[in-house]
Amino acid sequence: MSIQLTDEQARAVAASGEVPPTLVDPKTQTDYVLIRKDLYERLTREEEYDDSPWTAEERDALAWEAGKHAGWEEMSEYDDEDVERP
């Protein structure tokens, strides 16, 4: 299915630049993000997009990065302690 943009909508899309515009269904108030078809296709290709559950290593790396941003790097002396993890 294809929906033609009005001139006003096309101008709004062009004005949005690199940020995808958000569309709102006035009846349901559901938000949609409008991206180019080529970007959508690239995102949905199996070999390029991995939506599988995170591994323990990926979760640890994410927690480490979050801790650094929270200023926890000063607590590095606790990293060497044996801590039982779930």
Image (cartoon, helix red, strand yellow):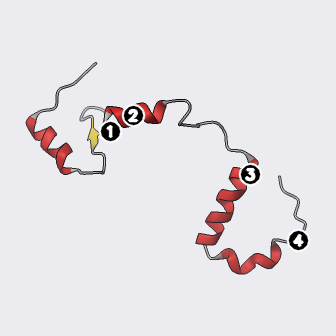
* Identity of the residue furthest to the front in this view: 47
Q: Is residue 18 left or right of residue 69?
A: left
Mark 4 and mark 3 lie on one chain; the one further toward the N terminus is: 3
The answer for how far apart the CA atoms under marks 4 and 2 are is 45 Å
Residue 78 image offset from top left, x and y in percent: 82, 75
> As shown in the figure, which amino acid type bears the numbered disc 4?
Glu
Mark 1 and mark 3 lie on one chain; the one further toward the N terminus is: 1
> As shown in the figure, which amino acid type bears the numbered disc 1?
Ile
Residue 69, placed above or below residue 49: below
Q: Which label is found at residue 35?
A: 1
Residue 11 image offset from top left, x and y in percent: 13, 44
Q: Are marks 4 and 2 in contact (CB under 8 Å)?
A: no
Mark 4 and mark 2 lie on one chain; the one further toward the N terminus is: 2
Residue bearing the label numbered 4: 81
Residue bearing the label numbered 3: 57
Residue bearing the label numbered 2: 40
Task: Classify 10 Å Cα crowding around label 1: few (below 14), some (14-19), many (20 and above).
Answer: some
The answer for how far apart the CA atoms under marks 1 and 3 are is 32 Å
